[in-house]
Each structure stands twice: as structure tokens, then as C-alpha cells.
Image: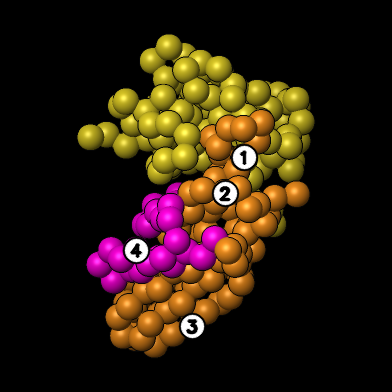
Chain colours: A yellow, B orange
Amino acid sequence: KAGVTQTPRYLIKTRGQQVTLSCSPISGHRSVSWYQQTPGQGLQFLFEYFSETQRNKGNFPGRFSGRQFSNSRSEMNVSTLELGDSALYLCASKVRENTEAFFGQGTRLTVV
Amino acid sequence: QKEVEQNSGPLSVPEGAIASLNCTYSDRVSQSFFWYRQYSGKSPELIMSIYSNGDKEDGRFTAQLNKASQYVSLLIRDSQPSDSATYLCAVNGNYGGSQGNLIFGKGTKLSVKP
């Protein structure tokens, strides 16, 4: 059974640009969550999608957005990139709430 | 502010010893608790989940949960150098009645010395 797949693995962007990251969950998993990991703040929750609907949102500015498609694949978008957006972005999928979440390999975003 | 607290470490143990990792959480309604292992430069890997009070064993790993004390721990028996990693405690959040997200502690860095 294939795991969670995130693309791309690495990205370098310039301040002010926008970026789109992709996540394909484990087959059968309808919940996809996104997290940002930085050395200073640790792992922080961005948002969660379930059946194409955003179910939860963390405390991040509106520049961070996402969506989920009918096949459960998800994308997150960050507009007007700032240096502080440099981080490892992780996607996790699970069957439903209150169950185990499995992470993808992450996308390492560097903003210069 | 819902929080999960862990000692940042580093926790250093000799090979073959028991490593004990601890975590406390603030949200009394949390129902699901997880331990993830993260090697440097890699993504978190789920190693244990626990949902009810008591102990849960899986190989060399034992998770312990005490909801009254809002405390969850992970014991690693017969520690190996390959266990050297950062261990993240995660608790299901509860926003708007949905437990769709995880709240993570900052992690405890474990070093197992040969």
C-alpha cells in the first residue's frame, strides 16, 4: 500500500512569489491535514480537509490556503511568500478523525 | 491555548538501557494520543497510538496514558543507537467539536550511546 506522497520535495522561491504544494493521501484516507515545521516553533497545524471541505484551520494568515479534490488529493498554496515561510511542510492523511495520521516525506520550502 | 509539553532534552542513555520520554497535555477532552519518531531531515513516523488509560506494548515500545493526570509517556526498552531521534508527542485537538488535527509537543531528542 502506497504511503502519503508529497511533491515537490524541495522548492526555492523568492520573496513575494507564490507556491503550490501537492499531497496524495493513502488510498482510502479521506482526511488530509497540513503542518508547518520550523526549528523554533516545531510542528504547527495549518488546516485539515475532509471530503473536499475544510474542517479545521490553525492560526495562520490568509496567505495560506488549501483545497481538496474529489479523489482526496490536496494542495496548499502560499501567496506573497515571506522569508519566515521557509519551513518543512508536511501533509498527513488518516481514515477519519480521532485515528492515526501518517505523514508524507514533506516539502522543504526555502524563501530567499 | 491548548498545549502539549515535552522536555526538549537531549536525553542520553547507554545502549541496552530503558529510555523514558514524558509528555503532558492541557486539554482534558483529548481522546487520542500518539508518539512519533523523527530522524534528522526526515518526516515524523508513527510508532505508537494509545486511546485508553493504562499501558500499551508493541515490541520494545510501551506507551502509558493517565488521563486524570493528563500525562502520557513512552518507554523504549533495550535502547539501540538506531533509536537516536527526536520523539514527538501528539494529542488530538478539539476545534469546533472536530478532532481532525494534532497538537504536537516540541519533541524530546534522544541519544543512545554505544
Q: Choose between A8 and A69: the one closer to the eye.
A: A69
Q: Position of residue A48 (x, y in %)?
A: 56, 29
Would you name the residue on which mark 4 appears?
B56
Q: Nearer the viewer, mark 3 or mark 4?
A: 4
- Badge 1: residue crowd in 10 Å (few <14, some 14–19, many ≥20): some
Q: Nearer the viewer, mark 2 or mark 3?
A: 2
Q: Secondary structure at mark 2?
A: loop
Q: Which mark is residue B94?
A: 1
- Badge 4: residue crowd in 10 Å (few <14, some 14–19, many ≥20): some
Q: Nearer the viewer, mark 3 or mark 1?
A: 1
Would you name the residue on which mark 2 appears?
B30
Q: Are marks 3 and 4 on the same chain?
A: yes
| Amino acid residing under circle 4 | Lys
- The mark nearer the N terminus, 4 or 1, is 4
- The mark nearer the N terminus, 2 or 1, is 2
Whether the residues at callouts 2 and 1 have beta carbons within 8 Å, the answer is yes
Whether the residues at callouts 3 and 4 have beta carbons within 8 Å, the answer is no
Can see residue B42? Answer: no
Q: Position of residue A50 (x, y in %)?
A: 49, 23
Whether the residues at callouts 2 and 3 have beta carbons within 8 Å, the answer is no
| Amino acid residing under circle 2 | Ser
Q: Which mark is residue B12?
A: 3
- The mark nearer the N terminus, 3 or 1, is 3
The CA span between labels 2 and 3 is: 30 Å
The CA span between labels 3 and 4 is: 24 Å
- The mark nearer the N terminus, 3 or 4, is 3
Left of A29 or right of it: where is B101?
right
Q: Choose between A74 and A81: the one closer to the eye.
A: A74
The CA span between labels 4 and 1 is: 24 Å
